Image: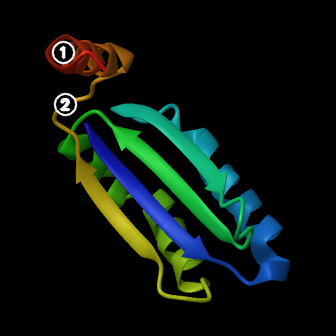
Amino acid sequence: MVQVVLRMVTHGRRTAEMARTLRSLMLPLQAAAGFVSCRLYQEADRPEVLCYVEEWRTPEDLNQQIRSSHYTRLLALMESAVEPPDLQLNWVTDVKGLEYLETVRLLNYESTGD
């Protein structure tokens, strides 16, 4: 899986507009080949900061999107950020859940009694 994480600082008065634009980009992605998920967050302590996250099954699926008009629109939006946007592409090779925490905590308890 490949995860795209985009963090942008917006003009305070334009945050809602930028969030609407990002949401408008999210809906068509659901029909794209290899789409896993897409989410939009707003930082609690800095509401002018938006975090946009996409997840794709394979690098090839992401590459197809990068060449699309979707990314042309996303890049244009990035250019309107107040500060240079922070963009990360994360290649995720393993995902663990609560079972992992339980296993680690159980192993720690057995070895230390804590």
* Left or right of residue 27: residue 3: left
What residue do we see at 60% from left, 53% from top? 25
Q: Residue 74: in sight, yes or no?
A: yes
Q: Amino acid at mark 2?
A: Asp
Identify the residue at the far front of this view.
113
Question: In the figure, 41 relative to 110: above or below?
Answer: below
- Dots 2, 1 in contact, CB < 8 A: no
Decide: few, some or many residues near mark 2? Use Cα within 10 Å; few <14, some 14-19, many ≥20: few
Quarter of the image containing the C terminus? top left
Residue 15 occupies quadrant: bottom right
Whether residue 1 sits left or right of residue 42 in the image: it is left
Please tell me whether residue 80 is drawn above or below residue 90 in the rendered image.
Answer: below
Could you say where residue 107 lies in the image, as x and y percent from the top left? 18, 15
Q: Nearer the viewer, mark 2 or mark 1?
A: 1
Q: Quadrant of residue 80?
A: bottom right
Query: Where does the image place residue 26, in percent across and percent down from the top left?
Result: 59, 46
The residue closer to the viewer here, 109 or 28, is: 109
Question: Which residue: 35% across, 21% down?
Answer: 97
Few, some or many residues within 10 Å of mark 1 (<14, 14–19, 20+): few
Is residue 67 shown to the viewer in this render? no
How far apart marks 2 and 1 lie (CA) works out to 21 Å
Q: Residue at x 19, y 44 (%)?
A: 60
Q: Residue at x 81, y 66 (%)?
A: 16
Instruction: Look at the numbered disc 1 and give the secondary structure of its residue.
Output: helix
Image height check: is 82 above or below 92? below
Three-letter residue code for mark 1? Leu
Residue at which label 1 appears: 107
Circle 2 sits in a helix, a strand or a loop, which is it? loop
Give 26 or 19, whichever is nearer the viewer: 19
Q: Nearer the viewer, residue 28 or 81?
A: 81
Residue with the mark numbered 2: 94
